Image (tube, grey):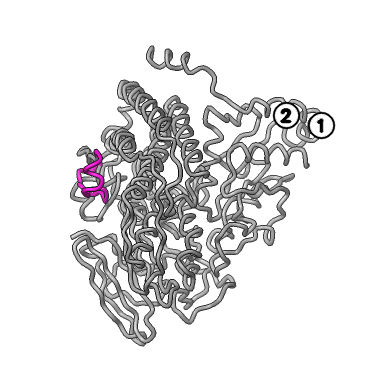
Amino acid sequence: MRLIARYAKDKGRVFEIITVYDTKVEKEQVRKEEPTIQTLSHEHPAALWFERKMQDDFGIIIKDAFDKRALLHQEKFPKDCYPMRKDFDKTELKQGELQPYNYEVIKGDGVFQVSVGPIHAGIIEPGHFQFSQAGEKMLHLEVRHFYKYRAIEKMLEGKTLQEAKPIIERISGNESIAYQICLRDIILQASQQLLPEVLQKRHAFLLELERIIHHLTDLGFIPNDAGFGAALALGSKLAEDARRKMKEVTGHRFGFGAIDFENKFFDTASLREWLQSMSESIAYFEDWIIDIPSLWDRLDTTGKLALKKAVKYDSVGVVARASGLAIDRRLNPFYLQRGFTLASQTSADVAARFKVRISEVKNSLIMMQNFLEADESRLEVASVNDGEYMSFTESSIGELFMAIDLKEGVIERFFARDASFMNWQALHVMMQHDIIADFPLINKSCDLSYAGNDL
Amino acid sequence: MIKFWSKRVKLGVLTENLEFDDEIKSIQKEIKESVKKKFAGSLAIRMVDSGSCNACEAECNALANPYYDLERLGIYFVASPRHADVMLLSGVMTFNMQPHVLDAYEQIPAPKWVISLGDCPAMAAPFEKTFAITAPAEQHLKITHHIAGCPPSPREIMQGLLEFLKKI
């Protein structure tokens, strides 16, 4: 059973704890006076962040957990402040007394600590990595995030779905289309409507375009982190080409605001030609890069996440597929009929994740040909009904989960779980046989989002 | 490698916006004095993300691709605030990031400037004020120049950096 998400809701007198697995959804209620739940982290280590988040957001006490440190609330966050409770309405916080954070460290003769972040030595998002080192060898890594915590869950409460849309599409810039599609599915469920196939194809086209932009960027950056800069020049050129195509078809380089219910004009003939030339470029790229032995020397066997561990940590997305797991939200008739094939590798290392990305770009280009259709139909969205809704999308990183409760037409509770939230928790497992110089390479091969993780 | 070089020759030079080269040539005269003194001929930027959606960072990374190739203008991103002249600040200044942003600013040797990037630091993006957001950034730092956009395109960022150079 794969854990997908675990989160709480403030229901007046009680907290409701929702646990979402791939096969079922479990609900549990606890009284506010005694908000104690049993941890799931012994069976599902990835439940830990969900539970620590609940503890910070609502003050829920997690029984038998081996880690009860604050997650979102960092050193200067005021004490006993539970912002996701309904009665919390502050928009300003004063910095509280400094509470030192105790990192998980390994101590011993000659073992030392390397602290990296939150501000990193590049153009990259903030997050902290704490290494316990024995010389070059990484003994342990603790990933500490939530520097970008913007309290988006709270921000969206009380808004209509229309008002929430511009914010939801900006949660994680690289996955904007995926977030918009998750929201689209919730709007459709709430208005009990079906999406015309033409629109479905248009949206799927944009989602694949977003995926190839993201993958092409990584196909440049991963070799670059192994010291092979020429790949970055070519990869970033191709990514820019795709990014400009996104601008051409949606009017925005990241597709903000692109998923709506109108099928605007697509110049299918020129897009087909472009897709063809992209396919040739990626074929050239693959043929060229596969022949650089010194590069593969770095990528092969580095950063392994064995299948057993990938299952244990409930990994998703590119990381899971590179470890041999068949997890992809596109495994459904709509995609399968249009040429979807699951990219899969079993070597579970950086090389595997690199190869999965190449296969996915190639497969996306094929599917995009099949998604193209000249049609200008539209859908009038009916009014939405109150209720509890959930949706899933396969973003460029992996499975994205979103849940929205509507009450009196406005959002009562918003919850989103980015694929990164699961995979960050498995990152330390990949480091156990490598040296610290491999860390940037391994981290980049997963290319996880900080913004989507921190919300 | 032969494959690569034949591709390289076929593709030729991809760099665009050559007008920026002319522009920098023309403003070089006017900024010569100050840039020579303050920046020793080149501008070093420390990018700090204080809670963006990562789109601004993606566009800054795009500045290095063959189409824009920012470094040819003598403007480049550095790894440490101690090597920087300018802090390029993106994001909504989260409660959790604020102390670190101010720390990084402290570490930049004077004279130093802050350029805010994108709509977030000015609270002009769709995000609303919550307890976890401390933007607008100008409440905490003196902002010399603002590059608007959500996110600003690489071209707009280049344009903005040149405007900043003219300004100081």
Disc 1 from disc 2: Cα separation: 11 Å
Q: Is residue B129 left or right of residue A88?
A: right
- Note whether B56 is above or below A104 in the view shown: above
Q: Quadrant of residue A38?
A: bottom left
Total count of labels: 2
Residue B12: image location, x then y, percent: 51, 17
Q: Pick whichever, A193 or A177, lies toward us.
A: A193
Quadrant for the C terminus of chain A in the image: bottom left
- Residue A345's tag is none
Chief secondary structure of the magenta span? loop
Where does residue B127 sit, x and y in percent of width and height?
A: 55, 61
- Label 2 is placed on what type of residue? Glu
Q: Nearer the viewer, residue A402 or A379?
A: A379
The reply to whether residue A106 is in sight is: yes
Say which residue label 1 marks.
B30
Say which quarter of the image contains residue B6.
top left
Which residue is pictured at 38% across the width and 34% down the height?
A219
> Disc 1: which chain?
B
**N-terminal of the two: label 1 or label 2?**
2
Query: For residue B77: magenta?
Result: no
Name which residue type carries label 1.
Glu
Residue A110 appearing in the image: no
Q: Which residue is mark 2?
A: B23
Which span of residues is magenta-colored? A322-339
In the displayed structure, does residue A284 sit left or right of residue B125?
left
- Which residue is at a point 43% across and 39% down the rendered structure image? A266
Mark 1 residue crowding within 10 angstroms, few (<14) / some (14–19) / many (20+): few
* Residue B143, position as x, y percentages in the image: 71, 52
